[in-house]
Amino acid sequence: MVSLPVYDKSGSKVGTYEIDPSQIADTINKQLLHDVVVMYQANARQGTRKTKSRAEVAGSTKKLYRQKGTGNARAGGKRSPVRVGGGHAFAIKPRDFSYRLPRKAVRLATRMAIASKIQKSQVAVVDSLEMQVPKTRQVAAMLKAMGLAGKSTLIATEGHNPVVYRSARNIDRVEISPVADLNALAVLKPRQVVFTRAALDWLKAQASQAIA
């Protein structure tokens, strides 16, 4: 059982949240986490780089000089890969690097990533982030009081809240996302994850159904 610190909107500690990482994921499979993170990174690649082959570079195909009698090494056309300005022998072509792992494996990896953060005491809980109008200063002050100023932080809310999102989106090294949209890479990348209490309750309920 792990006791997570609970804070209010001002960043003051108001209690603890008891949670067992096994409630989120039975085990933590590092190989699965690695595979899923690599998948997300591969899917983010543009794959637009390209180099020209000898068929695509400008230049004549005429033999530069006769085969024998000049004292030089034999040479073909100027577009040969061994000559300056020639084409590449194995030209790079645009390609799609994306692929998908099974959906159940991807969802399990997300829960494993969260359970790993809980085990390492890299998770905090906020009672509520409800506010009437966007206030970036208020969220920044809360994170500073929690000791997270300047640290890479992910804030997970129960659902999409435009006001909270607009309050946190411009803070340096801070990402904000609904808990249902989290993935293994998004969870593992920041140093600290901050859940709202409602988001963590929702996550525990979803995890219990998946484990059962």
Image: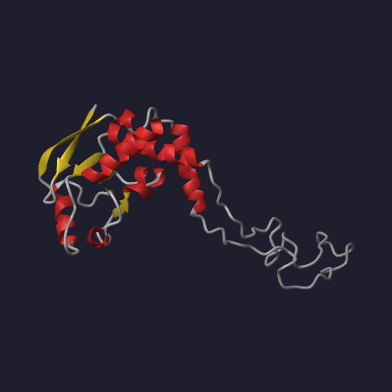
Task: Say which quadrant the N terminus sits in.
Answer: top left
| Residue 103 placement (x, y as % from top left) | 49, 42
Which quadrant of the view contains residue 199? Answer: top left
Direction from residue 39 to residue 7 in the image, left or right: left
Seen at 81% across and 59% down, the residue is 73
Seen at 35% across and 39% down, the residue is 206
Name the colouring of the figure: secondary structure
Frontmost residue, 56 versus 138: 138
Visible residue check, residue 50: yes
Frontmost residue, 22 versus 79: 22
Which quadrant of the view contains residue 86? Answer: bottom right
| Residue 145 placement (x, y as % from top left) | 13, 49
Direction from residue 5 to residue 76 in the image, left or right: right
| Residue 29 placement (x, y as % from top left) | 43, 31
| Residue 208 placement (x, y as % from top left) | 34, 33
Seen at 31% across and 40% down, the residue is 203
Count of labels in the image: 0
- Establish if 95 lies above or below 13: below
Direction from residue 24 to residue 52 in the image, left or right: right
Task: Say which quadrant the C terminus sits in.
Answer: top left
Visible residue check, residue 196: no
- Establish if 100 lies above or below 51: above
Seen at 19% across and 61% down, the residue is 136
Frontmost residue, 52 versus 10: 10
